[in-house]
Image: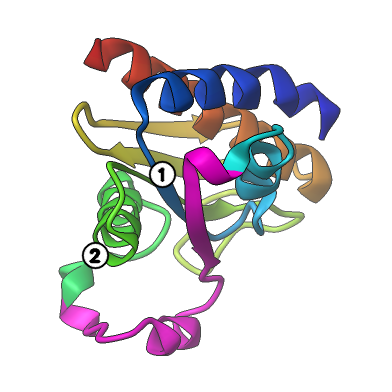
Amino acid sequence: MRELMPLAEQAAQLLKARKQTIALNESSTGGLISAALLAVPGASAYYVGSVVIYTREAWQVVRDFQMDELGGVRAATEHHAQVRARIAQQRFATVWGLGETGAAGPAGNRYGDPAGHSCLAVAGPFEGVRTLRTGKTDRFDNMHAFAAAALQLLVECLQAQA
């Protein structure tokens, strides 16, 4: 996780300087993005909370969630990642939301996406989406690559808001 810290620190610095907050809705990163943001001292100033929704069944525990909020869009798409980011932002009442969905590996997902496929999104004053395909099947490496790409996207959106 140490390789994620420079991006997490950069995001934390921007959030703290603006007195802004963030919440996350992760899937294939398993909370790794949250862990990096929480590893920065003073995280309580900007980090509100997160959920890791890994299966369709897990959506049922999100308070007041209706499946139609996903708009019929399957997981592991940019649209789905954006919906995840907006749900995190709205449910936690934060300035920013970050969503992630993908296939870490070693195999692809049930939708036909290969291992190493992740869609990332940021909701907030400036929004962004990105698809990453690492071309790797190593689960651990992919999870870290997905988390790094998500933090990079967050930093870019925070900088663009200025």
Indicate whether residue 53 is drawn in magenta. Answer: yes
What residue does disc 2 label? 73
Foreground of the two, 39 or 69? 39
Give the residue drawn at x 33%, y 38%: 122
* Picture residue at 78% right of the left edge, 49% below the top: 139
Is residue 40 found left or right of 83 in the rendered image? Answer: right
- Tell me the residue at 51%/40% (across/down): 45
Amino acid type of the residue that numbered disc 2 sits on in the rendered structure:
Val
Horizontal relation, residue 159 to residue 66: left or right: right
- Disc 1 residue type? Ile
Q: Quadrant of the N terminus?
A: top right
- Percent of width and height locating residue 98: 40, 45
Helix, strand or loop at label 1? It is strand
Residue 72 falls inside the magenta stretch: no
The answer to which quarter of the image holds residue 21 is top left
Q: CA distance from mark 1 to mark 2?
A: 24 Å
Residue 110 in the figure: left or right of residue 105 = left
Whether residue 116 can be seen here: no
Which one is in front, 134 or 29? 29
Location of the C terminus by quadrant is top left
Instruction: Give residue 22's mark.
Output: 1
Q: Quadrant of residue 88?
A: bottom left
Q: Which residues are magenta?
A: 44-68
Q: Which mark is residue 53?
A: none
Judge depth for marks 1 and 2 and give the one in front.
Answer: 1
Category of crowding for the residue at label 2, using alpha-carbon neighbours closer than 10 angstroms: few (below 14), some (14–19), many (at least 20): few
Q: Residue at x 53, y 19 (%)?
A: 13
